[in-house]
Image (spheres, helix red, strand yellow):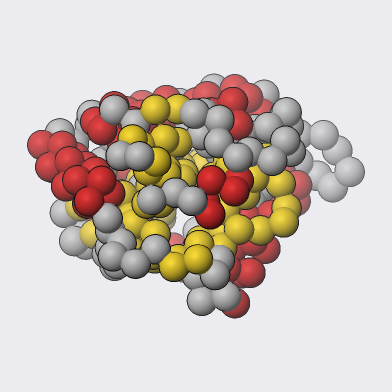
Amino acid sequence: MKIWLNGELQELDSARVSVFDHGLTVGDGVFETLKATDGQAFALTRHLDRLARSARGLGLPEPDLDEVRRACAAVLEANPMPLGRLRITYTGGLSPLGSDRGDQGQTLVVALGEVTRRPDSTAVITVPWTRNERSALAGLKTTSYAENVVALARAHEAGASEALFANTVGQLCEGTGSNVFVVLDGEIHTPPVASGCLAGITRALAVEWTGARETDLPLDVLDRADEVFLTSTLRDVQAVHRVDDRQLPGAPGPVTAKAMRIFDERSGDDLDP
Ligand code: PLP
């Protein structure tokens, strides 16, 4: 396996990042996960835009997006696989213990992992912890993901694959690594970005392609929604068949099934929508 680290392809086993990297010591970094099918990354331009936006939000120097593009192409070429997850990580770089973020350059890593297709439907839980829609980090894809790791572990203990958060005012927000949609009376709704959720790229495409509305929704909408689905780079559009103890028999329901179909067709037509 070859990865890209700071300007060149390197063997994964011998690539080295400092133990004082600010991304490692304090989570001062941003990242992107892209889907790559047969060596082609999906929605690369949108992912690079969001990487730059997240970096700006953290006050990191602007990443060199030409290098990131070259790195993605090189890693995909060096590691052929039918379905992969391309991971771009960009951090504050070397910063000796006890000091602020250093000015000795940032760390850029691009790596690839193999993935299998997700099932058409899945179970989710809600968790008692909240997303803070007024946090400095709201909407940024930073490497500070420990809260998501804890919530996801709780989901796995409950036999679910995702955990959903409300925000601080009790509105439905998002999952640990996905956005959430509900179907009410035949209409599709998803929380607005102001709820504190990540501006998911799959979410944006699903909104564009299905006409879903961005609506403030209370968390308990999950008790009455006719259908629920998730979106993310690795899930695409995925139906939900259980929320906590509530079963949603027949998932994917008709509206979700149509959204899945539209997403498959449109994303197959255009690699960089
Ligand atoms: N929300 C969070 C917290 C995420 O980490 C992710 C993706 O990893 C998403 C939503 C979905 O975003 P995307 O569709 O861009 O993968």
Quarter of image, res 268 = top left
Let me know if residue 106 appears in the view.
no
Q: Classify 87 as above or below 91.
A: below
- In screen coordinates, is 39 left or right of 189? left
Quarter of image, res 29 = top right
Q: Classify 104 as above or below 154.
A: above
Q: Position of residue 48 (x, y in %)?
A: 40, 30
Let me know if residue 57 appears in the view.
yes
Q: Position of residue 49 (x, y in %)?
A: 42, 25
Quarter of image, res 245 = bottom right
- Going 44% across and 68% down the picture, which residue do you hit? 247
Q: Position of residue 123 (x, y in %)?
A: 45, 66
- Going 75% across and 47% down the picture, which residue do you hit? 26
- Going 82% across and 34% down the picture, which residue do you hit? 100
Front in this rendered view, residue 57 or 234: 234
Front in this rendered view, residue 184 or 93: 184
